[in-house]
């Protein structure tokens, strides 16, 4: 089967690597002019003249990022199956729509307000209590399009900096850790769940993901499973869905945002789970049985950001698996990741520290369970 992928970055690259053993072929449609997949048939379509040719080549379509015109995805749906659907993209790329969906399904979130002026932003900061985080309702990712406001007097400057006509303002959460749940729903409605991961972000960019968590209560995992199942069923979703959450001191979970695709916090599954998120996404969209999501052993994904370390040194670490994206170095750019696998969490933490010491721009790792 020839699978069409909207976007041609590292997530598409890893989808293809997982799909070749299934005899899948891949055609990527890149609209940026800067494809980096380096695999499959890449069609650059900056002038929007190659969509018909793309659709003639493929049997079904998926995507590796959600910042796509909904109208484009809807037009493709009229010609070829698209998984996940345009409705999932419509909701996920608009934070106000996303929060409304969470509210409707009874999924708790941090307190929030929607504002459309600097004055309304200042009022929201006073009402929610500083500090707050203000985000553009669309187009923000990896810390872009947002600002932390520590005083109502700073609201006007934040409004100018974000420069978007509508913002969502969220109260800060006294959380123990940031976590994510990744689940997969097949075309027949079957759902499987991966163990939750603890995620460490620096400057809005994911740096470390550990799964499974050694101190996670089964009830918390079940709660997260319930939240994401509700989203999957409500959207009649097919493929991998990711839900990012805050875990509070009382063990509760508050939803932050969701992503309708394979996700950075699920890269650990390539070497640490029975079936990777990439293979399971491909199984789901093709109507194949879903694979086991069980963890093989404690695993940590270490993102390589900005500058790469020496591959030979990284691979000297026992059970280290380096996944490079073949990208040029640039501050803040995701260049690769390293999956570290160990028999115990104690041994895993030693490996993570050793790995971080070999990466030029890696912050010191710190996890809530240490």
Image (cartoon, rainbow, N blue to C red):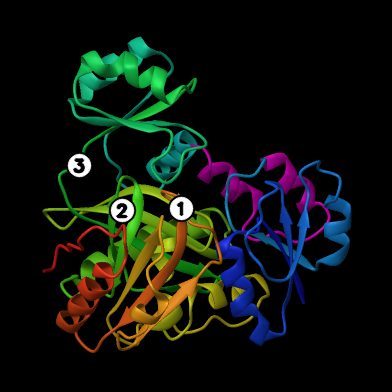
Place residue 172 in its image quadrant. Answer: top left
Q: Nearer the viewer, mark 3 or mark 1?
A: 1
Alpha carbon distance from label 1 to label 2: 24 Å
Q: Report the front residue among 305 and 53.
A: 305
Badge 3 is on which residue? 173
Q: Left or right of 98: which side holds 326? A: right
User: In the picture shown, does residue 293 fall above or below 176?
Assistant: below
Which mark is first along the chain, 1 or 3? Answer: 3
**Does 179 appear above or below 25?**
above
Residue 113 position, x and y percent, is 34, 26
Where are the magenta residues, as a range? Answer: 70-94
Residue drawn where x is 18% and y is 26% of the image: 130
Residue 245 numbered mark, or none: 2
- Is residue 293 in sight in this rendering? no
Q: Quadrant of the C terminus?
A: bottom left
Is residue 74 in sight in this rendering? Answer: yes
What secondary structure is marked by label 3? loop
* Label 2 crowd (10 A; few <14 / some 14-19 / many >=20): many
Residue 79 is inside the magenta segment: yes
Residues at marks 2 and 3, CA–CA distance in whole angstroms: 11 Å
Reading the image, the residue beneath label 1 is 333
- Which is nearer the N-term, disc 2 or disc 3? 3
């Amino acid at each position: 089967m020839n699978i069409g992928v909207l976007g041609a970055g590292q997530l598409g690259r890893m989808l293809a690597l997982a799909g070749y053993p299934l005899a899948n072929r891949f055609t990527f449609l890149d609209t940026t002019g800067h494809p980096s997949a380096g695999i499959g048939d890449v069609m650059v379509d900056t002038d929007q003249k190659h969509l018909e040719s793309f659709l003639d080549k493929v049997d079904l379509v998926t995507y590796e990022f959600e910042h796509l015109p909904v109208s484009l995805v809807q037009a493709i749906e009229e010609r070829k199956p698209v998984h996940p659907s345009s409705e999932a993209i419509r909701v996920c790329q608009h934070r106000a729509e996303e929060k409304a969906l969470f509210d409707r399904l009874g999924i708790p979130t941090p307190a929030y307000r929607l504002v459309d002026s600097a004055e309304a932003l200042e009022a929201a900061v006073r009402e929610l209590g500083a500090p707050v985080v203000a985000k553009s309702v669309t187009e923000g990712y990896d810390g872009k399009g947002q600002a932390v406001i520590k005083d109502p007097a700073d609201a006007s400057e934040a409004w100018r900096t974000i420069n978007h006509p509508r913002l969502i303002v969220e109260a800060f959460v006294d959380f123990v850790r940031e976590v994510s749940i990744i689940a997969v729903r097949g075309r027949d409605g079957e759902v499987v769940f991966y163990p939750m991961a603890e995620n460490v972000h620096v400057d809005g960019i994911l740096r470390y993901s550990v799964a499974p968590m050694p101190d996670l209560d089964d009830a918390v995992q079940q709660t997260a499973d319930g939240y994401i199942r509700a989203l999957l069923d409500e959207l009649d979703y097919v493929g991998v869905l990711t839900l990012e959450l805050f875990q509070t001191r009382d063990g509760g979970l508050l939803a932050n945002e969701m992503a309708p695709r394979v996700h950075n916090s699920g890269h650990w599954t390539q070497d640490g789970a029975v079936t990777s998120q990439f293979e399971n996404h491909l199984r789901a969209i093709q109507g194949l049985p879903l694979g086991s999501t069980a963890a093989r052993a404690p695993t940590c994904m270490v993102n390589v950001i900005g500058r790469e370390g020496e591959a030979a040194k990284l691979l000297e670490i026992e059970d280290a698996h380096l996944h490079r994206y073949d990208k040029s170095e640039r501050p803040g750019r995701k260049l690769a990741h390293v999956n570290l696998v160990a028999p115990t969490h104690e041994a895993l933490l030693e490996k993570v520290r050793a790995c971080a010491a070999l990466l030029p721009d890696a912050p010191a790792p710190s996890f809530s369970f240490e």
